[in-house]
Amino acid sequence: MLKIDNVFVNYGNMQIIQGVSMKINAGEMISLVGSNGAGKTTLLKAISGLKKVDSGTIEFNGESLTKLTASQIVELGVIQVPEGRKLFPQMTVRENLELGSYLKGPKKKRKENLEYVYNMLPDLKMKAKQPAGSLSGGQQQMVAIGRGLMECPKVLIFDEPSVGLSPVLVDTMFDIIEKIKADGIPVMLVEQNVQNALRMADRGYVLEQGVIAMEGRGNDLLENEELKKSYLGV
């Protein structure tokens, strides 16, 4: 599936990502955790073609992504649900969802995918004609997830989906992500909510200052004493 091998990414003279290697296998969910400034978002931009990789390789199903445009990467099925939702608030919920189906592949499956999204996220069907900006924060996050599902993802990458949500809505959001994984879509979850992120994950990675500091099974990492002290306050 998705393989990142010894990737370096710079901003000017600053080396933000330093030799990161990780992978997502078919049907798997991995979580990438780390503090603010660790380089998580920079790595996601590199995967999605929004930031140049200075060295190393990123491959999806054996095809290199490092020379492709962002739209070409989306066409391959590497889809990101961005931090902050990035919706068009004056457009309706349905119009925002349909923005995920304008490339050639997803456009053919627009009707089928819209039905899938409405079944997965029934609140969106009830609010389909409302402006996206009139929805609560949790509902807007559902629109962002639904838009990602409209893009026919072969791997779905979440960037901090719980930011700004109440504890109850955070639990709802993680339940939705687990349902997506259960439907066979591989998931990469980037989160500061370390406990939930690793609890859900088949495998996890801890990024510190652009370097993978720890990796392993999600539950095993939760039992790691160093991680407990650094991220869980235990």
Image (cartoon, helix red, strand yellow):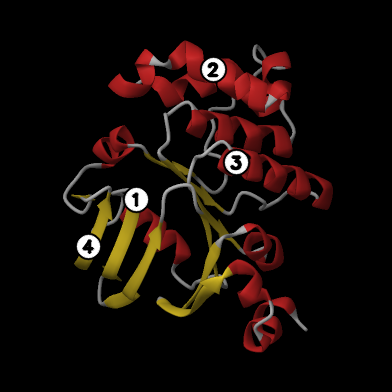
Name the residue at the right extreme: 168
Cα separation, mark 2 vs mark 4, equals 34 Å
Cα separation, mark 4 vs mark 1, equals 13 Å
**Marks 2 and 3: which is nearer the front?**
3
Quarter of the rendering containing residue 130: top right
| Left or right: where 91 falls relative to 105 | right
- Indicate which disc, 2 or 3, sits on the residue closer to the N terminus: 2
For the C terminus, which image quadrant? bottom right
**Marks 4 and 1: which is nearer the front?**
1
**Marks 1 and 2: which is nearer the front?**
1
Circle 2/circle 3 CB separation < 8 Å: no
In front of the other: 191 or 119: 119
Q: Is mark 4 on a helix, strand or loop?
A: strand
Within 10 Å of disc 3 (Cα), the crowding (few <14, some 14-19, many 20+) is few
Q: Residue 48 carries which label?
A: none
Q: Which amino acid does label 2 sit on?
A: Leu
Tell me the residue at 65%/15% (across/down): 128
Cα separation, mark 1 vs mark 3, equals 17 Å
Q: Is residue 116 above or below residue 172?
A: above
Cα separation, mark 1 vs mark 2, equals 25 Å
Q: Position of residue 17 (x, y in %)?
A: 35, 72
- Indicate which disc, 2 or 4, sits on the residue closer to the N terminus: 4
Q: What element carries label 2?
A: helix
Within 10 Å of disc 4 (Cα), the crowding (few <14, some 14-19, many 20+) is some
Q: Where is residue 226 in the image (x, y as percent from the top left)?
A: 63, 88
Report which residue position mark 3 lands on: 182
Cα separation, mark 2 vs mark 3, equals 19 Å
Q: Residue 1 carries which label?
A: 1
Report which residue position mark 2 lands on: 114
